[in-house]
Image (tube, rainbow, N blue to C red):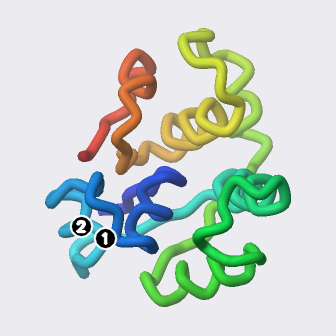
Amino acid sequence: MRVLVDTHIFLWALIHDHRLSTKSKQILRSNEHQLVFSLVSLWEIAIKIKTGKLNTIGSSVSYIRDEMDAYGMELLPIRYEHILQLESLPHHHGDPFDRLLIAQAVTEFLPVLTADKAFKPYGVKLLW
């Protein structure tokens, strides 16, 4: 099964954060799942690195890309269909990165590996 990995889940995995659930660790390590990481998440990480909010993971988004490769993650680009879906989403959540991830999950029929409860009102399948 293809699974869209939310930004914070991947970052927690990289720093071995205690908040990462056992199920999430299993999914990230499993060969049964194809992990998908959105270009939206790379964009969010690049902004947070530049503003000093992610000092713990290095100084470049290229490190994240290398780690994605180590996890065998597919990079999901932002497509026109995702933007159309974003336009039609109800405004339950204000974070623009999360909203675009939700739009991608809906469009691509992907469950989302996330601890973010704000995704729930959108009806996407959540894994945690």
Image height of 32 relative to 19, above or below: below
Coordinates of residue 24 in the picture (x, y in percent)? 25, 59
Residue that badge 1 annotates: 28
Q: Is residue 1 above or below residue 89?
A: below
Q: Is residue 52 left or right of residue 15?
A: right
Secondary structure type for disc 2: helix
Residue ID for mark 2: 25
Q: Residue at x 66, y 83 (%)?
A: 63
Hey, which residue is sitting farthest right in the picture? 50
Q: Are marks 2 and 1 in contact (CB under 8 Å)?
A: yes
Q: Is residue 83 above or below residue 45?
A: above
Residue 33 located left or right of residue 79: left
The amino acid marked with disc number 2 is: Lys
Q: Quadrant of the N terminus?
A: bottom left
Quarter of the view holding residue 120: top left
Q: CA distance from mark 2 to mark 1?
A: 5 Å
Mark 1, secondary structure of its residue: helix
Question: Looking at the image, which residue is at 73% across and 82% down?
Answer: 62
Residue at the spot x=71%, y=39% of the render?
A: 81
Few, some or many residues within 10 Å of mark 2 (<14, 14–19, 20+): some
Structural crowding at the residue carrying mark 1, measured as other residues with C-alpha within 10 Å and reported as few (<14), some (14–19) or many (≥20):
many
Q: Residue at x 70, y 53 (%)?
A: 53
Residue 90 position in % (x across, y down): 59, 10
